[in-house]
Structure formats: structure tokens, C-alpha cells
Amino acid sequence: MVFLIVSFLALLAFSTAEYYLHRRRARRIPIRIHVNGTRGKSSVTRLIAAGLRCGGIRTVAKTTGTLPRIIDTDGLEIPIKRKAGANIIEQVKVFKFFTSRKPEAIVIECMAVNPEYQWICEHRFVNATVGVITNTRLDHILEMGPTLENVTRSLCNTLPHDGVAFTAEQNMFWMMRKEAEEVNCKLLRVNADSVTYLELGQFSYIEHADNVALALAVCEHYQVPREVALEGMYNAFPDPGALRVIEAEENGRVAQFINALAANDPMSTLAIWQKVKTLSTDLGTVSFMLNTRADRYDRTIQLLEMVRDNLTKEFDYFFLNGENLERVYNSLPDYGIDQAKAVKIGMATPVVTYDAIFDRIPNIGTVFAMGNVGKGGLDIATFFGQRRRVRKGVAAA
């Protein structure tokens, strides 16, 4: 019994000391930017860091998106290797690494989904000088839902008390502003229209105007000129899950692969498809590819409902990849999707999907990939990318 008590007290003393050291490390970094939101966190984190870096501010960043990365002061990427799953304590270790590089600024993506953990990430670990909430969408409803209002309140847990925050959210801004007022946070809304199509066209992938507008606003807040910040953003590495249009060709047949897997939520996914239709003069044979995860079946249902309500006449084939193959296939009639159009792939290797797509393209085809990056989604997108070139200079909304 005595041993247990002594061990507990020793652990408590160690934890207290480690937390105290962490707070000291954090305060040594004068600019701390915490990025939260439903969509675009990783992209915005990278864009802000690149803009500040090009503006002469010694900046490090951390993303937890498709592939978790630390981005050092030279823009070089260091993979984060996890022995187990993601844990918010990781942020303490990351700060220890950050301070070894003596940065003037850090840009860190919120890695928590649970509302309480989001609060802890901000008010115990980061203590941001500037907060960012990209947007609020109906996603992760098991943790933050069930309503959009619940999700919005949850994301607002990372608003810095007595600080400044930026958002590109329009519909739920009224609620975010109320939440910000309660913690004396000055919340500023940016407008995507402030970014021109010419500026967007300079990216080597499809970047969203909302993301760029947010990043530019934060860089401007720290006196980085717009042209300088944009130069840094153009030259930065995008997130592996960034939206791309990949053109592949086999025996004279061409397939456009639209990687929208990182969108996840139905509203963002639908917006991307609508944008794709405005950018292409000939979609040809259209295939939707839904990549599913067993632990995110609620997301699968949301996407199927979105297809039922908006897109049932938009595709010729409906590819089913990932987990829960039979469950999803059997539910298709409930969402107005003809099972005769379904192509059952499951957890097969990427080449199986690649070949099955080209088997169904007589001349030109478009593949719209949605759902989840995990469980094979990223592997398929990577396979397409390795086979042929990425189309450059495409503007995005």
C-alpha cells in the first residue's frame, strides 16, 4: 500500500513538473497559432506556416491530417511515428521538439475531436496568440454532434481567451461570434472573394479560396505582405490529401481522378463535385468511388444521403471500396442507387480499382473519389498519381 502511495505521488510530481516545463517552453515562442475546424485544417496550417516563413519569421508547424507531419523552419517535413493511436499528449512532445529549433512562430493543427480534449489542447497546451477555425460542418457527429450547433460549440473550445481568431465560416458565424464574446476573443471573418482566380491558379493543386483567404489574413496580422505570403504558399508542399485532378491514360483512354477523399463531410464533398463540373468540358463516363471505414459508418450514411438527395443521376458507375462492402452494397436501394451500377471492390489492392475503372471507360472518364482517406483511399489516389501526371493550374472555389 505504501509503495502504491509513493508511486502515485512520484508520478504526480513528475507530471506537474513536466507540465510546468511545457508552459515555459510554450511562452518562449512569441507567436502561437492554433488551427481548428471541420475541413481544411491541414491545408491552412501549411499555408500559414509557408507564408510566415517566406516573410522572414522563423516558423515551425505540425499537421495531423492525412499523414501527420512536423514541418521545420526550412519547410522540410518530418514524419510523426506513433507506436499507438493519436493522443493529445503528443502535443507536449511536439512543443519540446519545437523549442529546440528556437522558432519565432508555431502553427499547430488541433488534433482533438472530443469537445473536452479540444478545450485542453488550447487552454492547457497551446495557449494560442491567434486562433483559426476554418469552418464548421456536420462531421464527427458521434463525438461533437448530433447537430451543427453542437459541432460549432465544440470547435469554439479552441478560441483563445482574450485573444484574436479568424474564420472563413459564413452560415454559423453568428453562433461563433457569441461564443467568442463569452471569452473576450476578437473573432474576424474572412471572405473567400478576396482571393482571385489568378492567385488560385498559381497553385499546383486545387486549393480552396477559403483556405487561402484565412492564411493570408493571419499572415497580414503578423505584417507579412500579401505577395510575399503567396510566394511562400505557392512553393510549399501541399498535404497528401490535397484536392487534385489526376489524369491517367491507358491505350488511348483517359481517366480524370478527382481526389476528394479528405473532404469527408457531405456538404464539402457536394461543393467539390459541383466545382469539378464547372472546370471540365467533358466528364465522359462518370464513376463515383465511395471509400468506407467500418468505424466511420455514420459518415458513409451521410454521404449516401447526399448522393440520394443531389446526385443520383450524375454517375454511370458507383464503386464501393474499403470496409463494410456487403453492408453498403445491400443498403444502396435505400438511397436511390441502382445496384446494377455498383462495382464491388472492397479492400483490394489499388491496381484492381485502377483496372476496373479503365475497363468501363470507352474513351474519356471521370472518377470522383469520396469518403475516407484511410483503409486504402490514399493508396488508390497515390497509385493514380504515380501512373500519370497531375494537372496543374486549375482554379478552385
Image (spheres, helix red, strand yellow):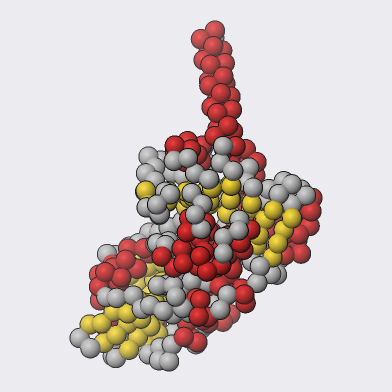
Rendered image quadrant of residue 166:
bottom right
* Residue 51, above or below 257: above
Number of dots carrying numbers: 0
Residue nearer the viewer, 317 or 42: 42
| 376 displayed left or right of 105 | left
Residue at 66%, 67% in the rendered image: 190
Residue 234 visible to an observer of this rendering = yes
The picture places residue 186, in percent across and down from the top left corner, at 74, 55
Residue 264 visible to an observer of this rendering = no
Q: Residue furthest left?
A: 251
Quarter of the N terminus within the rendering: top right
Residue nearer the viewer, 309 or 87: 87
Residue nearer the viewer, 274 or 184: 184
Residue at 56%, 41% in the rendered image: 29
Residue at 52%, 64% in the rendered image: 229
The picture places residue 208, in percent across and down from the top left corner, at 53, 72
Residue at 53%, 16% in the rendered image: 10
Rendered image quadrant of residue 327:
bottom left
| 121 displayed left or right of 73 | right
Residue nearer the viewer, 309 or 67: 67
Q: Residue furthest top?
A: 2
Quarter of the C terminus within the rendering: bottom right
The picture places residue 317, in percent across and down from the top left corner, at 39, 82
The picture places residue 319, in percent across and down from the top left corner, at 38, 75
